[in-house]
Structures are given as C-alpha cells and as structure tokens.
Image (tube, rainbow, N blue to C red):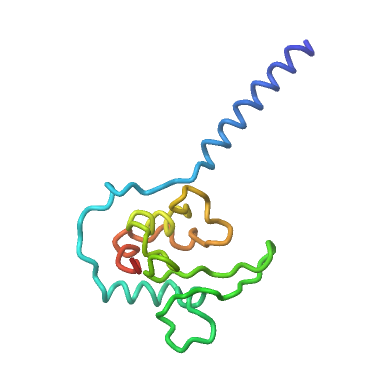
Amino acid sequence: MLRRLVVLALIAAVIGVGAFWVVTIPATVPAGALPQRTANLDNGKTMFLIGGCASCHATPGQDDKTRLGGGFGLKSPFGTFYAPNISPDPRDGIGKWSEADFVTAMVKGTSPEGQHLFPAFPYTSYQHMKWDDVRDCSPI
C-alpha cells in the first residue's frame, strides 16, 4: 500500500512539474501574425501618453520626455531596477528589434532572446491592448 502511494505521489509530481513548465513557457508573437500596415502616428502619440512610457523610459533630468534613453531608477523588493533605453537607436536602444519583438515584449512580457521580462516589466498593464495600438506606439 505504501509503495502504491509513493508511486502515485511521484506520478503526480511529474505531472505537476510538466504542467508548471508548460504554463510558464515564455510566449511570443510570430512575425507572421502581424500583417502589413501603415502606422497611425497620431494614435501612437496617444498610446505613448496614455501608457506613461516617458514616466519610466525618459532619461532623468532631460527636458524632452519623448527621448527614451532610459536610466530612471525604480525601487522594488528585488532592488533598484533601471529602466532601459527604448529609443530606436540600434546600438543603445531597441532599434534592432523587429516589430514582432516589440509586440511580444508589450503583450507577452518576453524579450527577443525568449526570456521573461517580468517582474520588472509590467506587461500585464499592456497585455490587453489591441496589437495595432501597440504597433502604433512602437519606437522601431
């Protein structure tokens, strides 16, 4: 009887670990899911303002809040997190990202390298945005 319980517990543990692994796989948005379109810059500006992008990503002490050089320190239970540069600069910003990379980061919380951006990145605040709205505010 004890042997049977141990076997059942092991099977349940394997199933539990497998389910946890499947549920926590970083999700992505494939490039093929984003049809060709022309960005709506007015809507992009609105999304930028509503999303509060500058509150974290503008360089501290800079007058132009639309220049997103990052560097703002956010204190958290995990230590101080410094917001990254999300400018379109290919070397210092996210200019090498694809549009699918940007949408994935915004709505799935996954980096282009396939790693979770959470808990530092609050993608849960943006995950229900329409993809066209996300694409309109992309700095890429």
| 19 to the left or right of 13 | left
User: Looking at the image, is 103 positioned above or below residue 51?
Assistant: above
Residue at 55 percent of width and 74 percent of height: 71
Locate residue 82, reporting x and y percent.
58, 70
Residue at 42 percent of width and 56 percent of height: 107
Residue at 34 percent of width and 76 percent of height: 46
| 22 to the left or right of 6 | left
Q: Image quadrant for the C terminus? A: bottom left
Q: Image quadrant for the N terminus? A: top right
User: Looking at the image, is 120 positioned above or below residue 71?
Assistant: above
User: Looking at the image, is 100 positioned above or below residue 56?
Assistant: above
Residue at 48 percent of width and 78 percent of height: 58
Identify which residue, 54 or 82, lies in the foreground.
82
Residue found at the far right of this picture = 2
Locate residue 48, reporting x and y percent.
38, 74
Identify which residue, 77 or 111, lies in the foreground.
111
Locate residue 17, reporting x and y percent.
61, 32
Residue found at the far bottom of this picture = 63
Count of numbered tags = 0
| 131 to the left or right of 93 | left
Locate residue 116, reporting x and y percent.
52, 51
Residue found at the far front of this picture = 91
The quadrant in which residue 72 appears is bottom right
Identify which residue, 80 or 16, lies in the foreground.
80
